[in-house]
Amino acid sequence: MPIDIVRDTAVSILLRVFTDSVPISDAVDRGLRRKHDRLSPRGRRFLTQLVYGTTRHALLADHVLAPLLHQPLDKLPVPIRVILRMGVFQALFLRSVTFPAMVHTSVDLAKKHGHTGTSRLVNAVLKRVPSSIDNVSLPDSASSSAEYLSVRYSLPMWIVSRWIKEHGNEGATALCAVSNEEAPRTIRVNALRTTRDELMERLVKSEILTQPHPIIPDLVEISDGPLPMDTKAFREGLFYVQDGASMLPPYLADPQRGERIADLCAAPGGKSTHFAALTANESLVVACDLDPRRMRRTRGSFDYVLLDAPCTGLGTVRRRPDLKWRLQPEAPSRLAALQRELLRSAIGLCKNGGRIVYSVCTFTPEETFGVLESIKGDGAVAFEDGPPWMDSWKISPGQYRVLPSAGDLDGYFLARLRKRR
């Protein structure tokens, strides 16, 4: 029988993620483009599920595999390690895949990416893998809550320990659990070309089930159906694939027509295009370089400045599961130093009386409250509330926080500032 092209492509993508540190979204997009003509819509969805799921549950998979091997897992060839991890993910979490099919396809992959010996190893090991997460032997949560959460939800110990310290055991457990789930599928309506109701009607015709978000305007939630990027509506530019939390910074700014807006860390452009839509394309939106030295050259000329700063991204781990394997414990403090410098530059760019929004897709104290503390004492800015419909996320005047464990949005922190001088 020919090798399963979906699983084989998934292995190639996972090798790029684990070995070459290619961002998972880029690796998946490239893999889907290269095999587009050979994959059905169902195959593309399954491929995406395999890659994201295997990456998301990598530490748990290694925990399951370790006692079944006669050698350390990291001594195996990387392709074989990836095939074993992918097999464990299918066994524990994919009810649509039978256990024999998981073993058989994994052995075929091991033959292609290894040799007869490695295929025998894969066969022997995967036949002994538990068929349910309920049958996995996990660390005792009573004696070591951090170790249990780290293994069960496949998160580095330093992240789990930090969350327990900052949010308590109950809060950390909720964060760990939600960070290991599949990210909700959401899209932002391009209000310059259509309305939310019209777009939802179009998507229903493509067998995509949708519903409007109960709070955030122009946000559509997708509950089932094909990938929205495969639709004609996407090719026509009627929507942008985006999480609802990342839509909040432009809304917090409340931009008006005719204003000059600077988006300082604009890539890949979601917030810049959102500004254009919110002001009916009647404002000047400038996507700026993040180099503070370059920003100072155009100081003091914008009505509104958005600084969606480079950050640890811990609020987006369920959407970017590869991120948790690349981050280091010193990252929050290191990035906070850059964020403080960028925020001062953003204030310098803004005209007197203008508005600055600082936002990060994380919730570490260093990158949120700590950054704002650095500018509180100089009297240059004052905190200012945004639209009332955002009050459910307000934690103090002008400051907002979204925790992923509190709903269906990514984690985010935002603050709105009015420049005094």
Image: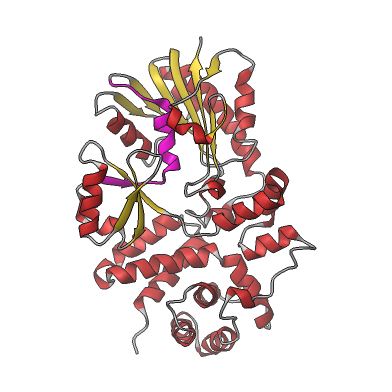
Confirm whether residue 414 shows in the render: yes
Q: Is residue 326 left or right of residue 23?
A: right
Count of labels shown? 0
Q: Is residue 245 left or right of residue 127?
A: left
Q: Residue at x 62, y 19 (%)?
A: 376
Q: Residue at x 70, y 63 (%)?
A: 148
Q: Residue at x 39, y 29 (%)?
A: 288
Tell me if residue 172 comes above or below residue 412 in the rendering.
Answer: below
Stretch of the chain drawn in magenta = 239-257
Q: What percent of the width, then of the height, locates residue 411? A: 53, 44
Q: Nearer the viewer, residue 137 or 374?
A: 137
Q: Is residue 4 left or right of residue 169?
A: left
Q: What percent of the width, then of the height, locates residue 65? A: 63, 77
- Residue 261 falls within the magenta-colored stretch: no
Q: Is residue 78 left or right of residue 236?
A: right
Q: What percent of the width, then of the height, locates residue 358? A: 50, 29
Tell me if residue 106 comes above or below residue 54 in the rendering.
Answer: below
Confirm whether residue 290 shows in the render: no
Q: Residue furthest right?
A: 143
The quadrant of the rendering that contains the N terminus is bottom left
Residue 11's quadrant in the figure?
bottom left
Q: Residue at x 59, y 34 (%)?
A: 368
Residue 63's quadrant in the figure?
bottom right
Q: How is the image coloured?
A: secondary structure
Q: Nearer the viewer, residue 211 or 292?
A: 211
Q: What percent of the width, then of the height, locates residue 408? A: 47, 49
